[in-house]
Image (cartoon, grey):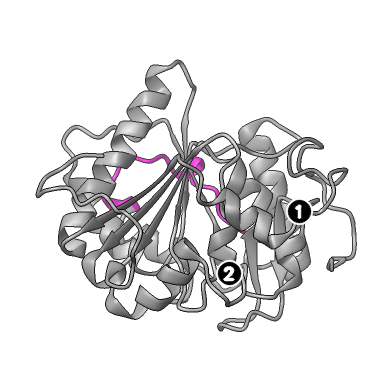
Amino acid sequence: MRMRMGGDSTVHVSQSGTGASSPDPTWSTLAAQGTMSGRRVVAFVSADELGPALAHLIASRAEKALGNGAGSFSLGLSGGSLVSILSKELPAVPNLDCKRWLVGFCDERLVPFHDPESTYGLYKNQLFSKMNIPDDRVLTIDPSLPVQECAEDYANKLSKAFDTQQTPVFDMLLLGMGPDGHICSLFPDHPLLQEKQKTVAPISDSPKPPPQRVTLTLPVVNAARCVVFVSTGGSKAPVLKQVLEGGDGPVLPAALVAPTQGELFWLVDEPAAASLTLDVERPGPGAKL
């Protein structure tokens, strides 16, 4: 099942891998890819220990990318608890230079930036003001546009920033997971899970308010060089078990994240990991990934 969005997207995913010319893989196949040996599930005693490890992981990947001659380190942000974690921990990383970072958003709500639902607005007030990321290297939506045009405009911004008409490849994407297993603004059983042509898609019927949003699509998520999930709290334990270990229930959006040539981290705290039976890493205090 596909959802036709009306109008042609100006940016398309590449025709290889997850491109449109490939047969649609089954959800079970995609979920199985998520159990690849490259996946690391790391459980911390608490979110307070998880935060510094996440910040160091971001800083180390930025240093690696820039040290390898890249002109920038591209980072995709999500909202939720990640805002407070990053706002506390990233500014505490010593000598962190962000002038060459390129920051985008995995999804965004179609609301004004001053609205408390705006992910960019939250990061601007809580994080960006503490870091030396140039304003023109933060890629934001245009919330004045209708949702379809807003998605197309953001796809064009990514295309220009990444200098490609194909799939933009982020160095790192930071994802949260909702209690229903959704990621970005890709919700269970929603037709956008099957979207393979667009890099950025509009959604007008989000089951979680506000209803109008724009979101990266799964091909962009799975093209990233490193995807990091952050999931904390005991309320996430049942869905985390379903996503990581499978079962009789439906395959949830988070289980479809399987970077084709990248790393996949699940950083969780012990309450979220309480129901897991698979082997997880349990680093000591102050550990670095």
Residue beneath the point at 42% across and 30% down? 100
Q: Which residues are magenta?
A: 128-141
Residue beneath the point at 16% across and 46% down? 92
Q: State yes or no: residue 140 in magenta.
A: yes
Vertical relation: 129 (above or below) 231: above
Q: Which mark is residue 25?
A: 1
Q: Which residue is mark 2?
A: 252
Residue 246 appears in the picture as rendered:
yes
Per the model, the C-alpha gap separating discs 2 and 1 is 15 Å
User: Badge 1 local density, few (<14 within 10 Å), some, or many (20+)?
Assistant: few
Judging depth in this view, the residue of 152 and 112 nearest the camera is 152
Q: Which mark is residue 231?
A: none
Kind of residue at badge 1? Pro
Q: Quadrant of residue 264?
A: top left
| N-term mark: 2 or 1 | 1
Q: State yes or no: residue 119 in magenta.
A: no
Where in the figure is residue 103, as x and y percent of width and height? Answer: 47, 45
Where in the figure is residue 50, as x and y percent of width and height? Answer: 22, 56
Residue beneath the point at 81% across and 54% down? 24
Q: Which quadrant: the N terminus?
A: bottom right
Judging depth in this view, the residue of 234 and 105 nearest the camera is 234
Residue beneath the point at 89% across and 65% down? 6
Where in the figure is residue 181, as x and y percent of width and height? Answer: 51, 72
Vertical relation: 167 (above or below) 240: above
